[in-house]
Amino acid sequence: MYNETTCREEMVMNRQELRDEIRKLPAVERVCLVEEAWEDLDEEEQDSVLSPEQRKELRRRIENCKANPPPVYTWDEFVAKLKSSV
């Protein structure tokens, strides 16, 4: 006799089976699946991804970048600077 736990266990694929099934999809559907998975990750708590120390360091770097923005060059300026350094 089946109960809810047994049904769930039978419906679960292992990672390899899941990858095999995904690879059978057309490329467009695989891209959509990846985008949906990425959006799901983005919606989850970001705090669980970074440790408190990592968040602190990230905030420090962002503030430093805002306070001391790196120089921005046009393409022509970049090429000229590159040629003058060689």
Image: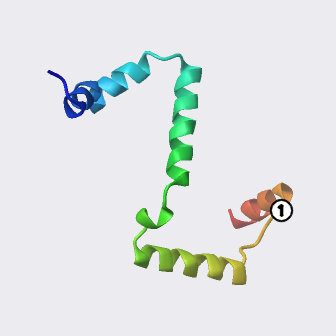
Residue 3 spot, x, y in % from top left: 20, 29
Q: Residue 13 versus residue 56: which sits nearer the camera?
A: 13
Q: Residue at x 84, y 60 (%)?
A: 74
Residue 69 spot, x, y in % from top left: 72, 76
From the viewer's perspective, tell me whether residue 20 is left or right of residue 59. left
Residue 78 shows up from this direction: yes
* Quarter of the view holding residue 77: bottom right
Q: Is residue 86 above or below residue 40?
A: below
**Mark 1 — residue?**
77
* Quarter of the view holding residue 76: bottom right
Q: Residue at x 21, y 34 (%)?
A: 5
* Quarter of the view holding residue 13: top left
Q: Residue 48 versus residue 59: which sits nearer the camera?
A: 48
From the viewer's perspective, tell me whether residue 17 is left or right of residue 36. left
Q: Secondary structure under badge 1?
A: helix
**Quarter occupied by the C terminus:** bottom right
Residue 33 spot, x, y in % from top left: 52, 31
Within 10 Å of disc 1 (Cα), the crowding (few <14, some 14-19, many 20+) is: few
User: Please, what is the three-letter code of the amino acid marked with disc 1?
Assistant: Glu
Q: Residue at x 62, y 76 (%)?
A: 62
Residue 68 shows up from this direction: no
Q: Residue 59 versus residue 11: which sits nearer the camera?
A: 11
Q: Is residue 62 above or below residue 74?
A: below
- How many marks the image carries: the answer is 1
Q: Is residue 18 above or below residue 75?
A: above
Q: Residue at x 29, y 24 (%)?
A: 17
Q: Residue furthest left?
A: 1
Residue 79 spot, x, y in % from top left: 78, 57
**Quarter occupied by the N terminus:** top left
